[in-house]
Amino acid sequence: MSTDKTSFVYVTYIASTPHRVYEAITRPELASRYWGHENVSDWRPGSRWEHVRANNDRTVELVGKVVENSPPNRLVITWAGASQADDLSAQSRVTFDIAEYEDMVRLTVSHDELIAGSSMARGITKGWPVVLSSLKSFLETGRGLDVFAEPKAA
């Protein structure tokens, strides 16, 4: 597999406040309502975070460390599959930049240091758009989308 790196950037605008967007990302009980997973950490730089399936089996699917945390405007974490937690070459980085934009929020999610062509890089290019659309729906309507939905056959 190539060691070339790639990145993914997604920008969305949400009728909300920076504080509400930040809380929706970092509070497990909120993240589970639009992501189907809980993001679990104390959110201090250097601390571990876990992306835990919000169902009965509570599977930890992703892990990483908190790199930077400046609530409610910026959160930077490392990101790896749970089975690759100790493999530094498999870790990528996610930056959440949350900015006021008139009467809404501009959320920019940058996922970089991804191994080009890897299953993680392919997965996040499909995953982030639906998760962030669900976050937007959740904050604007109180109801997230089904992030596990599959395309209907033509």
Image (spheres, rainbow, N blue to C red):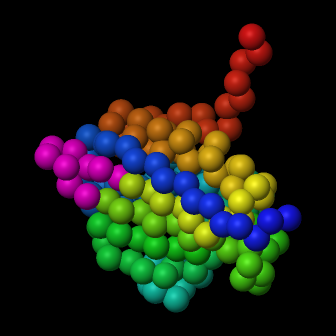
**Residue at point 74%, 11% (across, down):** 154
The percent position of residue 72, horizontal first and vertical second, equals 29, 67
Residue that lies at the very extreme toward the right in this rendered image:
1
The verdict on residue 12 being magenta is no
**Residue at point 14%, 46% (across, down):** 102
Residue 154, above or below 12: above
The verdict on residue 106 being magenta is yes
The percent position of residue 56, horizontal first and vertical second, equals 74, 54
Residue 79, above or below 9: below
- Confirm whether residue 138 shows in the render: no
Q: In the visual, does 139 lie left or right of 103?
A: right
Residue 71, above or below 99: below
**What secondary structure prevails in the magenta region?**
strand
Residue that lies at the very extreme toward the bottom in this rendered image:
46
Residue 78 image-quadrant placement: bottom right
Q: Which of 10 and 21 is in front in this view?
A: 10
Q: In the visual, does 59 lie left or right of 31?
A: right
User: Residues in magenta?
Assistant: 99-107
Residue 100 image-quadrant placement: bottom left
- Confirm whether residue 140 shows in the render: yes
Q: Nearer the viewer, residue 83 or 97?
A: 97
The percent position of residue 61, horizontal first and vertical second, equals 73, 62
Quarter of the picture containing the N terminus is bottom right
Residue 112 image-quadrant placement: bottom right
Q: In the visual, does 131 lie left or right of 121?
A: left
Residue 31, above or below 65: above
Q: Which of 151 and 119 is in front in this view?
A: 119
Residue that lies at the very extreme toward the left in this rendered image:
102
Q: In the visual, does 138 lie left or right of 41?
A: left
The percent position of residue 147, horizontal first and vertical second, equals 61, 39
**Residue at point 70%, 50% (across, down):** 123
